[in-house]
Image: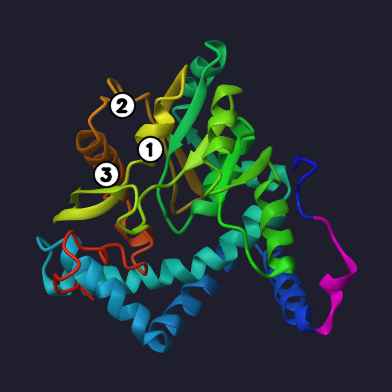
């Protein structure tokens, strides 16, 4: 479904410097031919190995859990850390599933909760801002939603042309096209056209265009104001949307439109978005991307960093 501006195969992409990328993608394509349960077993083993090797990422994830969930005991957080890295390993296979699986195989494992909210928005001719977050299943979030209603994704282009080609066309397997995360005009255009736009504002993008509001137990977490900016687009509804791995597959959760959002108050709106995301994460905290330094930006640059 990708548009004309989508990356195309070009001769230079077959230069020996990119053979490793092609090999990795080919191996991933082969691995996701395996039964789903076998993939998840292999993913957990890979995640366990990653936890032993990626010491710096383990340190970041452990610190994030300490900051976000101080109410848990140290043993509880360590158990969650172990599960989180198992989920990291599974996420590698889920990227391949999202990019390479045929629709029929994806549909066999997915359930949808809240599809009526999408139907209502379509009937009303409304654009849909999908308020999402960086679950480790985020690639499947876009793929599964696209099987409900093809939409538009927001992403960061890859500097490796082979990986850029793979991710763009993989993410458009059941969706329309992607827009660069810096292309605000493109996002607004998609919403004005009545499209669904996937948007995840839960990472730390620095102090520019951000406010400091609570996120989990951290009272002042840098949070971008772009969610409310996009939600202000005429005839747009904001729907919480995320995908959770279960024992038998995946459940795509689509929430009801947020009422009285945006309010016009940047602090209140950013706090509201964070509360929605936090509620989603608490449903499956082991599947969240705790490896990112979510709380690296402080209100005062002279403050001691958390990491």
Pick the front one: 23 or 230: 230
Residue 173 shows in this picture:
yes
Q: Which residue is mark 3?
A: 274
Q: Which residue is mark 2?
A: 262
Answer yes or no: do the residues labelled 2 and 3 have beta carbons within 8 Å? no
* Mark 3 closeness class: few <14, some 14–19, many ≥20 residues within 10 Å: many
Q: Position of residue 107 (x, y in %)?
A: 63, 41
* Mark 2 closeness class: few <14, some 14–19, many ≥20 residues within 10 Å: many
Q: Secondary structure at mark 2?
A: loop
Q: Secondary structure at mark 1?
A: helix
Q: Earlier in the sequence, mark 3 or mark 1?
A: 1
Specify the quadrant of the image occupied by residue 194. Answer: top right
Q: Earlier in the sequence, mark 2 or mark 3?
A: 2
Residue at position x 20%, y 69% in the image: 77
Answer yes or no: do the residues labelled 1 and 2 have beta carbons within 8 Å? yes
Residue 283 shows in this picture:
no
Label 2 or label 3, whichever lies nearer to me, is 2
As measured in the structure, the alpha-carbon distance from the residue carrying label 2 to the one carrying label 3 is 13 Å
Judged left or right of residue 277, residue 198 is: right
Residue 13 colored in magenta in the image:
yes
Up the image or down, 55 lies above or below 238; here it is: below
Q: Secondary structure at mark 3?
A: helix
Q: Which residue is mark 1?
A: 227
Pick the front one: 203 or 50: 203
Residue at position x 73%, y 81% in the image: 20
- Residue range corresponding to the magenta coloring: 8-16
Residue at position x 56%, y 23% in the image: 192
């Amino acid at each position: 479904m990708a548009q004309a501006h989508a990356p195309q195969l070009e001769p230079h992409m077959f230069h020996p410097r990119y053979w490793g990328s092609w090999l990795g993608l080919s191996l991933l394509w082969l691995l996701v031919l395996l039964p789903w349960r076998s993939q998840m077993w292999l993913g957990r083993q890979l995640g366990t190995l990653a936890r032993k090797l990626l010491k710096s990422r383990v340190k970041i994830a452990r610190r994030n859990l300490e900051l976000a969930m101080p109410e848990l005991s140290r043993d509880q957080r360590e158990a969650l850390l172990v599960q989180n890295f198992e989920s990291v390993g599974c996420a590698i296979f889920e990227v391949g599933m999202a990019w390479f699986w045929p629709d029929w195989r994806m549909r066999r494992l997915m359930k949808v909760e809240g599809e009526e909210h999408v139907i209502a928005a379509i009937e009303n001719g409304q654009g849909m801002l999908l308020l999402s977050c960086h679950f480790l299943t985020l690639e499947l979030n876009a793929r599964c939603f696209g099987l409900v209603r093809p939409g538009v994704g927001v992403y960061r282009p890859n500097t490796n042309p082979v990986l850029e080609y793979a991710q763009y066309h993989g993410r458009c397997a059941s969706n329309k096209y992607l827009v660069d995360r810096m292309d605000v005009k493109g996002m607004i255009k998609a919403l004005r056209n009545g499209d669904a736009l996937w948007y995840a504002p839960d990472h730390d993008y620095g102090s520019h265009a951000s406010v400091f509001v609570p996120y989990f137990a951290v009272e002042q977490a840098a949070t971008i104001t772009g969610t409310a900016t996009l939600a202000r687009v005429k005839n747009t509804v904001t729907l919480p949307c995320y995908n959770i791995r279960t024992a038998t597959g995946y459940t795509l959760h689509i929430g009801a439109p947020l009422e009285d959002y945006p309010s016009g108050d940047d602090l209140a709106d950013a706090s509201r978005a964070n509360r929605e995301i936090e509620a989603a994460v608490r449903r499956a905290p082991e599947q969240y991307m705790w490896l990112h330094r979510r709380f690296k930006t402080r209100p005062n640059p002279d403050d001691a960093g958390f990491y």
